Image (spheres, rainbow, N blue to C red):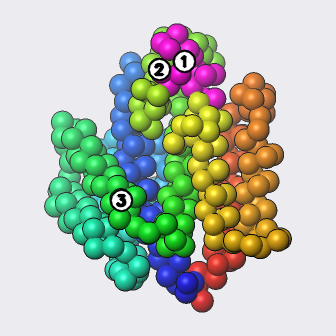
């Protein structure tokens, strides 16, 4: 496969996942803010920070207001990671690799873009925000469903899935960071009903509440939730699950090679050095520090994949 085709597939699915994840991040910020009696516009600073958009937002806006922050994350075309920008970028990449996609995948991608363009043509009010976010998530999920249902399990599928799981792991780490490091009111709140409500919100934001309750019941607390989202290999949005899936896709792309490629070496290091901890070791390390280390390693892995498969040649 040509490097530029692999690049287009990888980033098409990264952008689709980013769109869905940014919608989830907005919802997380909204829900957590509702648990704070003293919540104000400044509550959106850590959400922007975790999205990696705070500096760019500051260049465009003199003050931080809730409505401006949501609009920036949701539909501002000058923000390359906004939901609208991400879906548009996914469609552009899909056009570049159109012949590698099934008709159903292309149609679902194109439809997701057209609907996003229509419902985000104007500013979204707070009352309409939940339904708009839900619609956007459904449209990107439809592309994923069509991919599963119609694409051959070949190298095209492998690059698509690698992009998906790299972006998903990045998002889960960022959402954890929003909760534990930035939005927690104070050390005194740890273990309180407020703390527990915010952790519950984190589960909802990654569609993990049902699975978590099946596994742990209603009495489990923050440590179990963090373990579920970081280390549980059965949970489709956990860091351990996503990294394992990346490893599997890389293995499919290098059949019969005796010596693993550099990207395979990096993902093996990430998995064995950081995702074989128990949760107590993660908390001893520092959850924020652990999350930041994971984000750095995921970024480094992404760059290595681009280099190994010559995306720009």
Closest to the observer, 76 or 144: 144
User: Mark 1 — residue?
Assistant: 216
Residue drawn at point x = 44 percent, y = 27 percent: 209
The reply to whether residue 74 is visible in this rendering is: no
Give the Cα separation between the discs numbered 2 and 3: 29 Å
The magenta region covers 212-227
Badge 2 crowding class, 10 Å Cα cut-off, few under 14, some 14 to 19, many 20 or more, is some
Q: Is residue 111 left or right of residue 162?
A: left
What residue would you read off at disc 3? 149
Q: Secondary structure at mark 2?
A: helix
- SS type, badge 1: helix
Badge 2 or badge 3: first in the primary sequence: 3
Residue indicated by mark 2: 213
Q: Is residue 297 visible?
A: yes
- Which label lies toward us, 2 or 3? 3
Is the residue marked by circle 1 packed among few (<14), some (14-19), or many (20+) residues within 10 Å?
Answer: few
Mark 3 neighbour density, 10 Å: few (under 14) some (14–19) many (20 or more)? few
Q: Is residue 217 magenta?
A: yes
- The residue positioned farthest toward the right in the image shown: 259
**Does 259 sit above or below residue 3?**
above
Determine the residue positioned at 38% across, 62% down.
147
Depth check, mark 3 against mark 1: the one in front is: 3
- Distance between the alpha carbons at the discs numbered 3 and 1: 32 Å
Query: What percent of the width, then of the height, locates residue 294?
Result: 68, 48
Is 99 in front, or is 71?
99
Where residue 36 appears, x then y in whole percent?
A: 41, 22
């Amino acid at each position: 496969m040509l490097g530029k085709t692999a690049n287009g597939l990888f980033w098409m699915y990264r952008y689709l996942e980013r769109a869905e994840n940014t919608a989830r991040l907005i919802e997380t910020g909204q829900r957590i803010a509702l648990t704070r009696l003293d919540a104000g516009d400044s509550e959106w600073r850590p959400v922007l920070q975790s999205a990696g958009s705070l500096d760019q937002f500051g260049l465009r806006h003199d003050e931080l207001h809730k409505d401006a922050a949501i609009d920036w994350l949701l539909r501002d075309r000058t923000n390359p990671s906004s939901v609208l920008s991400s879906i548009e970028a996914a469609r552009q990449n899909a056009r570049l690799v159109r012949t590698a996609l099934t008709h159903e995948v292309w149609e679902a991608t194109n439809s997701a873009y057209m609907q996003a363009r229509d419902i985000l043509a104007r500013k979204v009010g707070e009352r309409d925000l939940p339904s708009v976010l839900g619609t956007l998530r459904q449209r990107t999920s439809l592309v994923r469903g069509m991919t599963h249902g119609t694409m051959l399990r070949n190298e095209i599928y492998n690059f698509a899935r690698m992009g998906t799981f790299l972006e998903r792991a990045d998002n889960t780490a960022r959402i954890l960071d929003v909760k534990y490091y930035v939005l927690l009111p104070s050390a005194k709140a740890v273990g309180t009903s407020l703390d527990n409500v915010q952790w519950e919100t984190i589960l909802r934001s990654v569609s993990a509440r049902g699975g978590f309750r099946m596994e742990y019941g209603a009495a489990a607390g923050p440590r179990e939730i963090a373990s579920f989202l970081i280390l549980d290999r059965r949970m489709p949005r956990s860091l351990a699950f996503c990294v394992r899936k990346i490893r599997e896709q890389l293995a499919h792309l290098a059949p019969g090679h005796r010596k693993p490629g550099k990207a395979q070496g990096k993902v093996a290091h990430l998995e064995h050095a950081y995702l074989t901890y128990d949760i107590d070791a993660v908390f001893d390390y520092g959850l924020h520090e652990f999350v930041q280390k994971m984000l750095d390693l995921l970024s480094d892995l992404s760059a290595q994949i681009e280099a190994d498969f010559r995306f720009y040649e």
